[in-house]
Image (cartoon, rainbow, N blue to C red):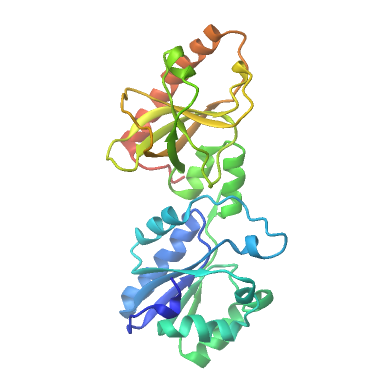
Amino acid sequence: MDPRSSSSRRESGLTIGNFDGVHRGHQALIGRTVEVCRGAGLRCCVLTFWPHPRAVLGSGQAPPPLTDRTERRRRILALGVDEVLELEFTPDLACTAPEDFVRQQLMPLHLRALVIGHDFSLGRGRSGDPDVLRQLGRRYSFGVEQLDPVMLDGDIISSSRIRRCVAEGNVAAAARLLGCWHSCRGPVIHGDGRGTGLGFPTANMGLPDTLVPAPGVYATLARPEDGQRVWPAVTNIGRKPTFDGTSMSIESFLLDAHADLYGRTLRLDFVERLRDERRFASVEDLTRQISLDVSRARVILDWAVRRGVAPAN
């Protein structure tokens, strides 16, 4: 949605960013924006961009997103925001001078308060730094508040830090930074049927556009998006080396579930990595290992379901 198309005449407070993952740092920034707006009687808005600026600038290579657009919007609104505005990021927008950006994109929102992160800047060459924004605030009658970074284990919580954790398969560490489990979603597609023959029928997910954890076996929570059920599951990401597989797949054995999920969208929450994917000497060895994976996953996921949220520290 173009901010200039917003029909509200109510004065607003705003924060701006990509908000990939809507992690704990983002949550603090958006939460503070909500506080400022509620205290001043302002409409609370979040302005974000699509596609990722790195997909438009430089080499055009953007990192795989932690969340898709729909999930990002859902998480932001869940924090108490009144409106999420998505601005198309283009080369022309990247070349916009800070004052022109404020005048063209922000003032139509009747901006009165701008809350920014510790490393925020906008406009051509990132020239709209906090000092420039404060000067523009005085000119256009809006306040600017800058937040300190949110730290965990001595380092700043950031989307790039979370991507590294997920890419390494350390989904438990990623969850601590996100404040929720890292998730992927996609349609359930037909596989080769081998899991059924092993006694562990699987739901095969089409590869998502978001970041997939490193190959391995994971304890997960499976959630069909058109229903309320949540099933504990064991998910294998990889190429099935025991069977000389060549293509990447995401296969989930849903514990205690017998639903027909073909064609439905499945969301997987990655709770903990169980082990590396590896080649087994025989099908019997693989089957024994899967049984061990299931037993371990039951313990881990029983705790996760009872707690209901990812660990905060």
Q: Residue 141 or 233: which is nearer the viewer?
A: 233
Residue 63: give x, y in percent of width and height: 62, 52
Residue at 30%, 79% (x, y): give it.
41
Residue at 53%, 39% (x, y): give it.
207
Residue 58: give x, y in percent of width and height: 72, 63
Residue at 38%, 23% (x, y): give it.
298
Q: Quadrant of residue 299?
A: top left
Q: Residue 301 or 10: which is nearer the viewer?
A: 10
**Does residue 189 sit above or below 284 in this rendering?**
below
Q: Quadrant of the N terminus?
A: bottom left
**Does residue 50 sit above or below 124 in this rendering?**
above
**Does residue 226 sit above or below 111 in this rendering?**
above
Residue 241: give x, y in percent of width and height: 62, 20
Residue 261: give x, y in percent of width and height: 35, 32
Q: Residue 184 or 221: which is nearer the viewer?
A: 184
Q: Is residue 58 left or right of residue 252?
A: right
Q: Is residue 143 visible?
A: no
Q: Is residue 122 left or right of residue 267?
A: right
Q: Is residue 125 left or right of residue 133?
A: right
Q: Is residue 258 visible?
A: yes
Q: Quadrant of residue 222?
A: top left
